[in-house]
Structure formats: structure tokens, C-alpha cells
Amino acid sequence: MSMQAMLMPVFAQVALTFALLFWMSFLRIQAIRQGKVAPHTIALREPNWPPRATQISNAYHNQLETPLLFYVLILLALETRTADSILLVLSWLFVVSRFVHAYIHITSNRIARRGPVFLVGAIGLALMWIIVAARLTIASSG
């Protein structure tokens, strides 16, 4: 599997993360400038942002949690040459699930919809880790 192919889902995930970061920043700056939030009321991470800014912030912070395991796994798979088309498909499954999860998070934010989408991505990511771990274990014992 080519490095470029394996990195495309990573780049897509990074793009989602930055898009949410910039959107969150814009909403927060706007809230301060419009006087909806006084800087001293959020200086120590107090939860005093307007609901929409909090909603986008939560979606952004979600991109810093499970995706961390994805980034590490892709680097490990590339470095150990265990990446293949199965991992590529599972990578795209994970990233698409993150986009759908973020979309639900920033729109209806219905947990009944968000939860199953998160689970699909988490299962795909867990399968990727199992595959890479198994390949590395088999390779080292052979």
C-alpha cells in the first residue's frame, strides 16, 4: 500500500479537525466582541460560552480524542510496513464516521444518532489495531 494512499484519510481527518478549530475560534471571538462573554468569565476554562460555541467546541474536542489512536496506528502501520488495502478501507471507514459524527454533533446533536456512528468508527479503529498487532506478533514469532 502506498504511503500517499494511507495518508489521505489522515489528511482528511486533520482537515476536519482544523475546520472545527477555526469555526470554534471564530464563534468564541465573536461572542467576546459582541459582549456575550466577558473574558474573565472563561479565562480558566469556565463553561460560560454561548451554546452554539460550546456545541462546536465539543465537536472539535472530540476530534482530539479517538483520532489520536488513529494517527498513531497509521504511523505504526506505515513504519512497520503492515499497511494494506484492508487498513486503507478501515481508515476511510473511521474517518467517514468522524465526519458524520461531527456533522450530527454540530446540527441536531442527537445522541441516539451520534452514538451508533461513533461505535462504528471505534469498532473499525479497534479492528485496525488488532490487525496491525496480529501482523507484528506473527512477524516477530516467525
Image (cartoon, rainbow, N blue to C red):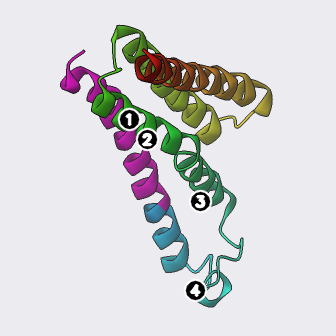
Q: Which residue is tagged 1?
A: 76
Q: How many marks?
A: 4
Q: Quadrant of residue 74?
A: top left
The residue located at (29%, 34%) in the rendering is 79
The question of residue 8 being in magenta is answered with yes
Cα separation, mark 2 vs mark 4, equals: 36 Å
Magenta span has 130?
no
Q: Residues within 10 Å of mark 2 (few under 14, many from 20)?
A: few
The residue stretch that appears in magenta: 1-24
What amino acid is labelled 1 in the image?
Answer: Leu
Q: Earlier in the sequence, mark 1 or mark 3?
A: 3
Q: Which residue is mark 3?
A: 53
Q: Are marks 1 and 4 in contact (CB under 8 Å)?
A: no
Q: Amino acid at mark 3?
A: Ala
State yes or no: discs 1 and 2 in contact (Cβ < 8 Å).
Answer: yes
* 74 vs 138, nearest the viewer: 138
SS assignment at label 1: helix
| Residue found at the far front of this picture | 142
Location of residue 123 in the rendering, given as x and y in whole percent from the top left corner:
64, 21
Q: CA distance from mark 1 to mark 4?
A: 41 Å
Q: Residue at x 38, y 35 (%)?
A: 76
